Image: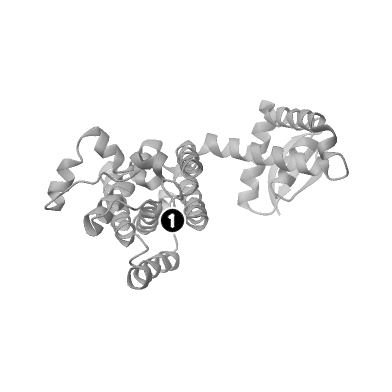
Amino acid sequence: MLRAASVPLTTDLRSLLAVLRVQGVQVRVSEEAGEQVVWARDERDVEAVAQALVALERGEIARAAEGAAQARRGLGDTLEGPNSAPLVNQAAGIVWRLARFSRRCPLTASLVLATLIVALLSRNGRDVAGVAMLFFPALPFVSATDLFLQLLSPWLLLRSVTPALLHFGELHLVFNLLWLLYFGRQLERVQPAVLVFLVYVLTAFAGNFVQYYTGGSAAFGGLSGLIYGLVGYTWLLGVMAPNSGVQLRTSTFAVFVIALLAMAIFASDSIASGAHLGGLVAGLACAAIVKLGYTLRRV
């Protein structure tokens, strides 16, 4: 095991250990040279311990525990019985983790929240009347340049990105959100918020633009174009700049590309293949530009 932290013997670690247990982080505490030493399994758990210690010092864990206790008392007879404490503790742990994720990855958390709100308002794509303004603007065009120039007004430019918030079915929604959380967590940890924001916007725009240009219909939506953009961005930047802190295995990238080709061949009528391709190309382009920026800064 790895040495995660050392704290004085007077520090009460019970609440910290309870939070780590809810998170699934397994630790061991021993006494050495008049201190309490916290041991963790791997680097990820070491980081979780460090974050929990910071929260403990700030009093956040104590407040969360008090909130859980108040909630348990307020629920009264509803949760009476031997399983009441675990239920409340799990709920408090989930809230605490979501709050921590929102602080560390505000852009990704905001995008997830906006997507979930749209899913609720549209009944996950079954009633889109209330969110019709989020669809790509239905514009006549004679060329890609003509379409792009028409989108340069602020309102139409915004609507060229908002289709990413629309989803049609639970599987579509969950799959995209899981990948967004995976990539967003990685990017916001190591890259400036402005850069992550630009990558999100540009890949979403490119995916939606290509889909409308190739399909001619505004009846599409989803984060898939943005997700494929993040696939291309993280893979190529990891290859070109290994020290950037961003990476994706080539095998995983290949799986995404094969899936894109398979969907285009066998499910082209029901899958926004243009959005996937446009997002992927935009993500690769963003990675190349960022790598160029890294190179110029060293000169």
Q: Quadrant of the C terminus?
A: top left
Residue 273 drawn at (x, y percent): 32, 62
Identify which residue, 242 or 88, lies in the foreground.
88
Query: Residue lying furthest right in this view?
Result: 81
Task: Please give the name of the residue rendered at 33% of the width and 68% of the height, measured from the top-left corner.
Answer: 264
User: Within the image, what quadrant is residue 227 found in?
Assistant: bottom left
Q: Looking at the image, can residue 269 be seen?
A: yes
Q: Amino acid at mark 1?
A: Gln
Q: Quadrant of the N terminus?
A: bottom right
Question: Is 216 positioned to the left or the right of 240 in the image?
Answer: left
Identify which residue, 156 or 289, lies in the foreground.
156
Mark 1: few/some/many CA within 10 Å (<14, 14-19, 20+): many
User: Within the image, what quadrant is residue 298 found in?
Assistant: top left
Question: Is 233 positioned to the left or the right of 151 in the image?
Answer: right
Q: Which residue is mark 1?
A: 247
Identify which residue, 5 or 167, lies in the foreground.
167
Q: Looking at the image, can residue 32 be seen?
A: no
With respect to residue 128, does 179 lie above or below?
Answer: below
User: Within the image, what quadrant is residue 210 found in?
Assistant: bottom left
How many tags in the picture?
1
